[in-house]
Image (spheres, rainbow, N blue to C red):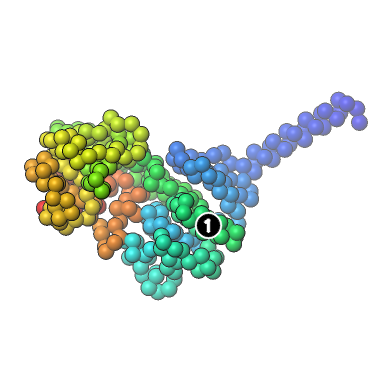
Amino acid sequence: MKTKEILLFLGLALISCKKEDAKNHTSKTYISQNVSYEENINQFILSSGNRNFQLPKSIFPLKRVVLLNSSLLGYISELGLEEKIVGVSSPEYIYSEKIHQGIASGKIKNIGNEQKYDVEKIIALKPDAVFTNYIASFENTYDVLRKSGVNIVFLDEYLEQIPLEKAAYIKLFGKMFGVEKKSDSLYNVIETNYHQLSKQASQAKEKPKVICNEMYGNQWFMPSGQSSVAYYFKDANVDYPWASTKGAAAVPLSFEEVLVKSKGAQYWVNLADYQNKNSLLAFNPSYQQLYPFQHGKLYGIGGRVHGKANDYFASGMARVDYILRDYINIFHPNLLKDSQLIYMKELK
């Protein structure tokens, strides 16, 4: 074969390979700044943080999954896919009645808790995938599962700071469970609601001052200006004293610093699920010195609590529109037609 013919043959072969490669691979789909996926004929390639997970296409759509943390349950429950869950950990922290019914009937197995997972039970369940937040101290457990052929995926949704990007994980679960149309439609509803609520809040005549959280040990960890809480406050149109702080990490403060900055604050929110002001003071009598305790209104995230389970940390991960609506109803009473609180509860 002459040189020109060889070059022509190689050129045509290269073009053919590129066409075949393009046909076998899809473009990357971004769920958030931290999570994306792409796929080819044989694999579903998920990028989460700085990790990549290559999952065989043969397991899709997922039919049997294990959840090692309850926050990811919110996305699956919103899609009505509880029957796909075969194992959970720490059921006492799960709010969903459907999951508890599944555990009671034996369809869903309790595979341990954050202290120790029952690895043998997880393997015996033969899940298509195990979903969890990454916890470094469990690396040995993860390694045993991997070596046993279990697909384990880390999704750290709590690291997402933009509320709608946190909610967008529902589209990822829709893709993996084969209900893309349903998940995309639900996300569109959440997104539309969120933007509409934010627009309504921006028209409020007043911009009340707000503080949040509480003491932990001898420090008060206040959400920074680039945290998810600060994003909610911005979209709810309030004056948050720490809105200008940089980064997503919480700002450690002394009680005295918060005492000074809280002067004039009309609201104190994101308290734990205390029953009333007296139970809050029983935890820390110093709180009585705070301006919002004396003159404002206090709200905890105790609206949907059952025992140790709090739905704010489950369905609230997906329904960020409901959380924003709660905040707006607190900060701007009577602005919205629906004033019913879902995740928040006033302390009196």
**Which residue sits furthest front?**
218
Q: Is residue 261 left or right of residue 35?
A: left
Compare residues 202 and 288 and report the one nearer the observer.
288
The image shows residue 342 at horizontal and vertical percentages of 23, 53
> Which three-letter amino acid code belongs to the residue tagged 1?
Asn
Query: Closest to the observer: 116 or 344?
Result: 116
Q: Is residue 40 left or right of residue 245?
A: right
Q: Is residue 328 above or below residue 126?
A: above
When asked about the image quadrant of residue 296, the answer is: top left
Residue at horizontal 33%, vertical 61%? 93
Res. 347 in view: no
Q: Position of residue 306 (x, y in %)?
A: 26, 63
> Label 1 belongs to which residue?
140
Q: Quadrant of residue 1?
A: top right
Could you say which is closer to the camera, residue 342 or residue 345? 345
Q: Residue 310: x, y in percent?
A: 29, 57
Say above or below: 181 vs 165. below
Q: Residue at x 43, y 66 (%)?
A: 112
Q: Residue furthest right?
A: 1
Work out which residue is located at the far left of the displayed protein and give it: 295
Q: Which residue does the image show at 14% across and 47% down from the upper left?
A: 286
Residue situated furthest top in the rendering: 4
Whether residue 247 is visible: yes
Q: Secondary structure at mark 1?
A: helix
Q: How many marks?
A: 1
Residue at the image position 69 percent from the left and 40 percent from the top: 20
